[in-house]
Image (spheres, helix red, strand yellow):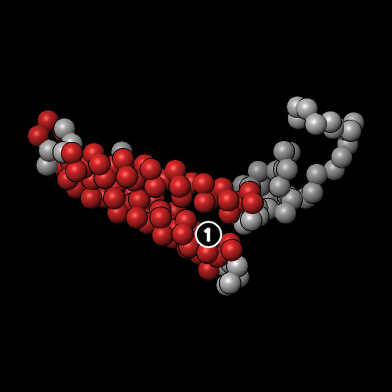
């Protein structure tokens, strides 16, 4: 599973890098995106090293170093996950203008348009 995660992480890095290049220079989003990407690259490297150290382990028991690298990768993933959330939810990066609860699937050919208010007025409670 660690190897599959590394392949997935590297594929996501390519797409993320392309998204990052589209962000205007000199913005907070460019800086946050850079730290998000760099942190995720470090995570992949930490897990690759941990996986390599585990590959020769007797009885598949990881060494203290392999386990520590995994913990560091996990901790850094919490930080880069928060940075990714900051990019999407706070800075509005990669958010479709027409995104809403009933938008069509991204696999369909239908464009996501702003939601029409066809129901009664929403109050601050639940969203049903």
- The quarter of the displayed image where residue 11 is located: bottom left
- Residue 3: x and y in percent read 29, 45
Q: Residue at the spot x=34%, y=45% of the render?
A: 73
- Residue 75: x and y in percent read 38, 43
Q: Residue at the spot x=78%, y=27% of the render?
A: 125
Q: Is residue 12 left or right of residue 103?
A: left
- The quarter of the displayed image where residue 74 is located: top left
Q: Quadrant of the C terminus?
A: top right
- The residue closer to the viewer here, 65 or 13, is 65
- Residue 77: x and y in percent read 41, 45
Q: Residue at the spot x=65%, y=43% of the render?
A: 105
Residue beneath disc 1: 32
Of helix, strand and loop, which one carries label 1?
Answer: helix
Q: Is residue 76 left or right of residue 127?
A: left
Total numbered badges shown on the rendered structure = 1
Give above or below for 8 relative to 63: below
Q: Quadrant of the N terminus?
A: top left
Q: Is residue 126 left or right of residue 64?
A: right
Q: Is residue 81 left or right of residue 41?
A: right
- The quarter of the displayed image where residue 104 is located: top right
- Residue 4: x and y in percent read 33, 44
Q: Residue at the spot x=65%, y=55% of the render?
A: 92
Residue 71 visible in the current orientation: yes
Residue 2 visible in the current orientation: no
- The residue closer to the viewer here, 40 or 101, is 40
Q: Residues within 10 Å of mark 1 (few under 14, many from 20)?
A: some
- Residue extending farthest bottom: 25
């Amino acid at each position: 599973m660690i190897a599959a995660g590394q392949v997935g992480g590297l594929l996501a890095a390519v797409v993320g890098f392309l998204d990052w290049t589209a962000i205007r220079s000199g913005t907070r989003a460019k800086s946050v995106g850079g730290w998000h990407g760099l942190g995720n690259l470090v995570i992949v490297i930490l897990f690759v090293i941990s996986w390599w150290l585990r590959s020769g382990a007797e009885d598949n028991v990881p060494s203290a170093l392999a386990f520590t690298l995994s913990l560091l990768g996990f901790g850094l993933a919490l930080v880069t996950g928060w940075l990714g959330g900051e990019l999407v939810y706070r800075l509005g990066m990669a958010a479709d203008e027409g995104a809403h609860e009933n938008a069509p699937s991204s696999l369909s050919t239908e464009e996501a348009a702003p939601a029409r208010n066809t129901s009664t007025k929403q109050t601050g409670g639940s969203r049903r």
